[in-house]
Amino acid sequence: MTIEFAKEGGLEVFFVFGNTGIGDIIVEQSLEAEVMTLIYEQSGLEDKSYGVLHWKCHGKSLEINVEEYESFGETANKLKFPNKKSKGQRVNSE
């Protein structure tokens, strides 16, 4: 998943699955700075371009890898969620 500033205002979020992706502006302009600051601070990107966002949801703890990069002169973030394992299957990480 990638999050970047949209030229129309707000944050554009892309979900990518293999060679296919879909995206839309889902964070309105008035919240964009707050959302990006939350990602930046919670994932420890103060002095590096890579970090981990620890998120607890429905009683489960997730470690979401966050990579900061530049897209058309603006800061953008790539968030990689942990792969869901099926029972008895191994998951290969990238």
Image (spheres, helix red, strand yellow):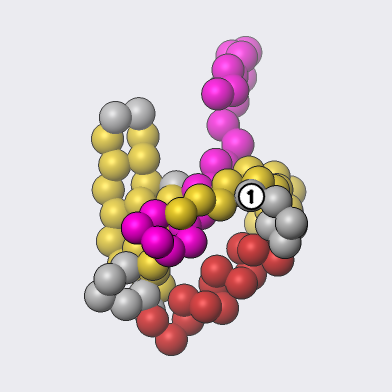
Reply above or below: 31 against 26: below
Q: Is residue 47 or residue 79 the one in the foreground? A: 47
Q: Is residue 91 visible?
A: yes
Residue at the image position 36 percent from the left and 40 percent from the top:
16
Q: Where's residue 51, x and y in %?
A: 69, 48
- Name of the residue lying farthest toward the front: 73
Q: As shown in the figure, which amino acid type bears the numbered disc 1?
A: Ser
Is the residue marked by circle 1 packed among few (<14), some (14-19), or many (20+) residues within 10 Å? some
- Name of the residue lying farthest toward the bottom: 30
Q: Can residue 62 be seen in this view?
A: no
Magenta stretch mostly in which secondary structure?
A: loop
Q: Where's residue 36, x and y in %?
A: 55, 69
Reply above or below: 67 against 6: above
State how many labels appear.
1
The boundaries of the magenta stretch are 71-94
Q: Where's residue 37, x and y in %?
A: 61, 72
Residue located beneath label 1 in the image: 49
Reply above or below: 47 against 37: above
Residue at the image position 38 percent from the left and 67 percent from the top:
5
Q: Where's residue 1, x and y in %?
A: 44, 47
Reply above or below: 88 against 69: above
Q: Is residue 38 or residue 58 the one in the foreground? A: 38
Q: Quadrant of residue 4?
A: bottom left
Helix, strand or loop at label 1? It is loop
Q: Is residue 67 or residue 30 the one in the foreground? A: 67
Q: Is residue 17 magenta?
A: no
